[in-house]
Image (cartoon, grey):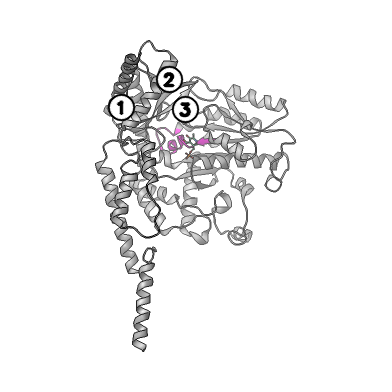
């Protein structure tokens, strides 16, 4: 009986091990499965890289939707080859390829290989960057990179956290400016009692070109979007600081409470940088929080050549930097950095099971005290691998190259008589439109909207679109350092070809 029982037990073990062979662990079979999976995935990635010539297949959402309607989520496992083939047809073949030079649309950068290596390690080890007891060295890596960012900004004793993106970083900024105001100026415990506007409505100031996440943050934090006062910009798309000061005074006169100003260092559409020094002086004068949204312009911190463009940023209270925009990192990878580490105490919450107060008193490091998230990805590892393997200088030179390219692209657009360039090349974005002769704004709007739509359906190049004073424009966001002048010429000639076709078609219809 014994041997038979032993055999049964072994059989049971074999079944269990097969059943659990999907788990990522040290078992030989599981390690083999993992390796096979990585190799198979890598092959598909190579196919995506090599086969792709156009940044987009041109597939339209209606067609994509019908494909997905036919897919049922399965109860039983599917064959690996089938799953990978399916993935190729429903995703990889159509994924918008940010690494190709003719992708020149949104704020998506091509990524560097060290970031991908970091991504692989961080997702496999799966540390959560909330407490030291879940991450150990990971916590120190994140803190070291926040410290680097803060020191580049010019803060003496910076602190902060990695976040999911500029939107979350900006939310943290508006949260801190709200809470600091209540704490210092009204002795009101907003954390316990919630928002009170009995002594006047809270007001936040930013330029009309600032990112929508500021308004969204004000809404989320109970201030309402109307709390955000939009300050006009100059013809260089930077905040008019005289208008800022009058707006602040105006709110005081109306019995409201200015709590902070957000300067944008690199606006989403124009790349323009608000006058940081002047804004710092005004924020100082009225004793209000000064946040710099450098989600876009944060790459300048890497650049020996261009860092001067951020002069004044060191006078801010907090800064947003998106590493997944200008540090060539995979999504997500962003930082929120403050000048005074104590400011972050305003949002700390001590939970007995996770981060009790006595841990802090004993000097145990953690990131959850400063974060909106609890479980948190170890995104810092990607930037760490990048800095260690490439060095900050080389990474900065990639970014510098995009700035040079943007200047060249601006000249090329200006030299084309059919295109009108709206903004001077501040960082890496150019707003322009196709403008054949004898067309009014309404006609140009319809033409440029259709032009972008047709280009997207063709997929040969992908450009973005935006509006300025009600008129529709096209946009280049130039974040790929291997682009060439020929690429810009080519994209403009595609735009011009499609544009003329539309004009001809319209004529025929008329
Ligand atoms: C100036 C600025 N701030 C914040 C954001 C939001 O960043 P994210 O998309 O990483 O949330 C953006 C995004 O484009 C931006 O341009």
Residue 493 location, quadrant: top left
What residue is shown at x 31% (from left), y 47% (from top)?
A: 88
From mark 2 to mark 1, how far is it between C-alphas? Answer: 20 Å
**Residue carrying label 2:** 445
Foreground: disc 2 or disc 1: 2
What residue is shown at x 36% (from left), y 80% (from top)?
A: 8
**Residue carrying label 1:** 491
**Residue carrying label 3:** 272
Identify the secondary structure beneath mark 1.
helix
Of callouts 3 and 2, which one flags the residue occurring earlier in the amino acid sequence?
3
Residue range highlighted in magenta: 291-307
Identify the secondary structure beneath mark 2.
helix
Of callouts 2 and 1, which one flags the residue occurring earlier in the amino acid sequence?
2
From mark 3 to mark 1, how far is it between C-alphas? Answer: 24 Å
Q: Residue 11: x percent and y percent?
A: 35, 77
Residue 457 location, quadrant: top left
């Amino acid at each position: 009986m014994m041997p038979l029982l032993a055999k049964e037990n072994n059989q049971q073990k074999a079944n269990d091990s097969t059943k659990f062979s999907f788990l990522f662990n040290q078992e030989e079979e599981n390690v083999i499965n993992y390796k096979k999976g990585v190799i198979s995935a890598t092959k598909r990635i190579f196919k995506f890289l090599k086969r792709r010539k156009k940044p987009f297949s041109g597939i339209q959402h209606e067609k994509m939707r019908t494909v997905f309607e036919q897919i049922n989520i399965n109860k039983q496992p599917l064959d690996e080859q089938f799953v990978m083939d399916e993935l190729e047809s429903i995703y990889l073949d159509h994924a918008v390829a940010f690494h190709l030079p003719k992708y020149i649309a949104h704020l998506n950068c091509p990524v560097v290989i060290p970031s991908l290596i970091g991504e692989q390690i961080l997702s496999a080890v799966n540390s959560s960057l909330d407490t030291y007891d879940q991450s150990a060295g990971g916590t120190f890596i994140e803190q070291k990179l926040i410290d680097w960012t803060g020191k580049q900004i010019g803060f003496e004793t910076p602190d902060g956290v990695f976040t999911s993106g500029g939107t979350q970083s900006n939310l943290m900024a508006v949260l801190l400016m709200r809470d600091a105001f209540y704490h210092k100026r009204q002795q009101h415990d907003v954390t316990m009692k919630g928002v009170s506007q009995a002594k006047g409505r809270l007001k936040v100031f930013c330029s009309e070109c600032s990112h929508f996440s500021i308004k969204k943050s004000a809404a989320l934090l109970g201030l309402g979007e109307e709390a955000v006062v939009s300050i006009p910009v100059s013809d260089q798309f930077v905040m008019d600081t005289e208008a800022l000061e009058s707006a602040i005074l105006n709110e005081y006169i109306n019995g409201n409470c200015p709590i902070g100003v957000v300067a944008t260092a690199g606006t989403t559409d124009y790349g323009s940088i608000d006058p940081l020094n002047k804004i710092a002086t005004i924020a100082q004068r009225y004793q209000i929080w000064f946040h710099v949204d450098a989600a876009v312009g944060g790459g300048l911190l890497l650049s020996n050549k261009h860092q001067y463009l951020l002069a004044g940023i060191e006078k801010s209270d907090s800064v947003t930097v998106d590493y997944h925009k200008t540090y060539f990192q995979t999504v997500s990878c962003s930082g929120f950095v403050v000048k005074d580490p104590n400011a972050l105490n305003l949002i700390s919450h001590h939970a007995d099971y996770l981060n009790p107060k006595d841990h802090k008193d004993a000097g145990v490091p953690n990131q959850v005290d400063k974060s909106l998230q609890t479980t948190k990805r170890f995104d810092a590892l990607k930037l760490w691998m990048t800095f260690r393997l490439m060095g900050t200088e080389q990474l900065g030179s990639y970014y510098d190259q995009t700035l040079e390219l943007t200047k060249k692209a601006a000249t090329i657009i200006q030299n084309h008589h059919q295109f009108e360039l709206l903004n001077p090349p501040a960082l890496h974005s150019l707003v322009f439109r196709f403008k054949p002769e004898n067309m009014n704004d309404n006609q140009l709007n319809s033409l440029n909207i259709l032009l972008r739509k047709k280009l997207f359906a063709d997929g040969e190049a992908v450009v973005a679109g935006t509006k300025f004073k009600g008129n529709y424009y096209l946009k280049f966001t130039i974040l790929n350092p291997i682009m060439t002048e020929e690429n810009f010429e080519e994209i403009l000639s595609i735009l011009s070809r499609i544009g003329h076709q539309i004009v001809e078609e319209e004529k025929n219809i008329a």
